[in-house]
Image (cartoon, rainbow, N blue to C red):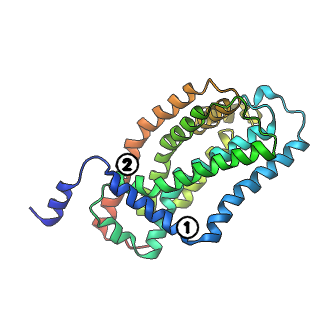
Amino acid sequence: MTLDAAITASISPFPRPAVVRAFARREFLTTRSYKLSFALETFYGVLELAVYFFIARVIQNVSTASLGGAPNYFAFAGVGIIVAAVLAAVSITIAQRLRDEQLAGTLEVLSAQPVTSVELCLGLVSFPFVFASVRAFLYLIVAAFLMDFDVSRTSWIGVTTMLVATAFALSPFGILSAALVLVYKRGALLGGMLIYGMTLLGGAVFPLSVLPGWLEWFGRVLPVRFAYDGARVALFKGDGWIGDALALVASGVVLTPLALLAFSAAIAHAKNTGSVSEY
């Protein structure tokens, strides 16, 4: 048995927590080292909330029937912004981090380590997800105390469940984007455009009812729609979010194995063609 075969055989088929934690710690230390960017990334979300807070003061007469349980337009858009932060963390970050590794010349070293594709993906997305979730709850606190965001009926278990289910359902799109980065080098842009389009059509900052009929139908079958709807009812009604959470979990169960297969194939292709270090 060759050395590579022996190493591969010794790797656990299940993600090893120590490996995932090591990747997450590395991502945290890297992010923390850029202190200004670390602070501005958090402040940007608060600024974005403020923009929609003042837009909502202009838009007074919006039918609440179309706002998915939100009491007003600001509450509707605010949830869209908060969930979008988590969505971006789990769907775009993997591809961006792999692209950074390519440009830094460390991807070849990383791909040679005895880690599985699942561990690599979990490791790259774990800290961004935790960071985005902390920011999401911070935004909720700011909106509740400074922007009249009503959380009196909120199910915090429901909100937390929806954020985790959103991460599980949408991370396959990030894994697919990462696979495109490995094969085509610039796949992060395509993945980012896809997520941005899904966010707009899924009901982030405007109701689906304003879309043309065929686009409204398309928006209603997107996984992100369940993320926004479930988060809104968990925040403003306290119940009724379980169906949306289950829909997200079902989507993740179907898409995650396919995305991981694509990512594994992309890594194998990059190694076989010697293009891991190319950018």
- Which one is in front, 213 or 178? 178
Disc 2 on helix, strand or loop? Answer: helix
Distance of mark 2 from mark 1, alpha carbons? Answer: 29 Å
Horizontally, residue 231 falls left or right of residue 7, namely right
Q: Position of residue 100 (x, y in %)?
A: 49, 69
What is the count of numbered marks?
A: 2
Please report contact status of discs 2 and 1: CB closer than 8 Å, yes or no.
Answer: no
Q: Of the residues under marks 2 and 1, which one precedes in the sequence?
A: 1
Q: Is residue 246 above or below residue 260?
A: above
Q: Which mark is residue 260?
A: 2
Q: Position of residue 244 (x, y in %)?
A: 57, 29
Residue appearing at x 82%, y 46% in the figure: 53
User: Would you say residue 114 is visible in this rendering?
Assistant: yes
Q: Which residue is mark 1?
A: 32
Amino acid of disc 2: Leu
Q: Position of residue 165 (x, y in %)?
A: 51, 37
Residue with the most extreme left position: 1
Residue appearing at x 38%, y 73% in the figure: 277
Q: Is residue 242 above or below residue 34?
A: above
Amino acid of disc 1: Arg
Based on the displayed image, in which of its 4 quarters is residue 153 positioned? Answer: top right
Q: Is residue 239 above or below residue 90?
A: above
